[in-house]
Image: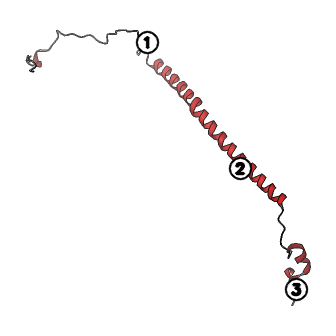
Amino acid sequence: MAATLHQTPQYRQQNHTDSPKKFNFANHKLHLLLFTMGLLRFLIIIFSIYLAFRILTTYVFPWLVKRSVKKYQEKFYEQNPHLKRDQPRKEGEVTIEKVGREESGNVPENIGEYTEYEDIK
């Protein structure tokens, strides 16, 4: 029977050594250093994403909302000129505005009878 490739002595010398591998400390330190650098890079990326999210939600999004509300408010008052804008007032300033006319003497006849009543204590 013919010898297969795995049984030849040349193949054993090149690929399979019978002696156990020696532990290479320099290679181990290199792997540990690369793992630590990768972990550190990952943590820096996560922290950067968190920081960017905090800045966006604290400053950028509220600014965009205020800007868009102001724009839509201006557009609303342009389309409805009969409505007037509330003017900003100083704190403590009092103004009295009459909304409609009250006519107390104009009561219809068919409303019913007026009944007087007293509080009983």
Compared to residue 10, the image places residue 83 above or below, namely: above
Cα distance in 3D space between marks 1 and 3: 103 Å
Q: Amino acid at mark 1?
A: Glu
User: Of discs 1 and 3, which sits in the foreground?
Assistant: 1
Tell me the residue at 63%/37% (across/down): 51
Query: What is the x, y in percent for residue 29?
Result: 80, 56
Q: Which residue is mark 2?
A: 39
Looking at the image, residue 42 sits to the left or right of residue 117; the answer is right
Dots 2 and 3: beta carbons under 8 Å? no
Looking at the image, residue 103 sits to the left or right of residue 25; the answer is left
Query: What is the x, y in percent for residue 43?
Result: 68, 45
User: Of discs 2 and 3, which sits in the foreground?
Assistant: 2
Q: Earlier in the sequence, mark 1 or mark 2?
A: 2
Indicate the quadrant where residue 16 lies. Answer: bottom right
Q: How is the image coloured?
A: secondary structure
Q: Earlier in the sequence, mark 2 or mark 3?
A: 3
Disc 3, SS: loop
Q: Which label was assigned to residue 37?
A: none
Compared to residue 61, the image places residue 100 above or below, namely: above
Compared to residue 18, the image places residue 111 above or below, namely: above
Cα distance in 3D space between marks 1 and 2: 56 Å
User: Of discs 1 and 2, which sits in the foreground?
Assistant: 2
Q: Amino acid at mark 2?
A: Leu
Tell me the residue at 66%/39% (across/down): 48
Q: Which residue is mark 3?
A: 3
Looking at the image, residue 55 sits to the left or right of residue 99; the answer is right
Disc 2, SS: helix
* Nearer the observer, 13 or 36: 36
Q: Residues within 10 Å of mark 2 (few under 14, many from 20)?
A: few
Q: Which label was assigned to residue 91?
A: 1
Dots 1 and 3: beta carbons under 8 Å? no
Q: Quadrant of the C terminus?
A: top left
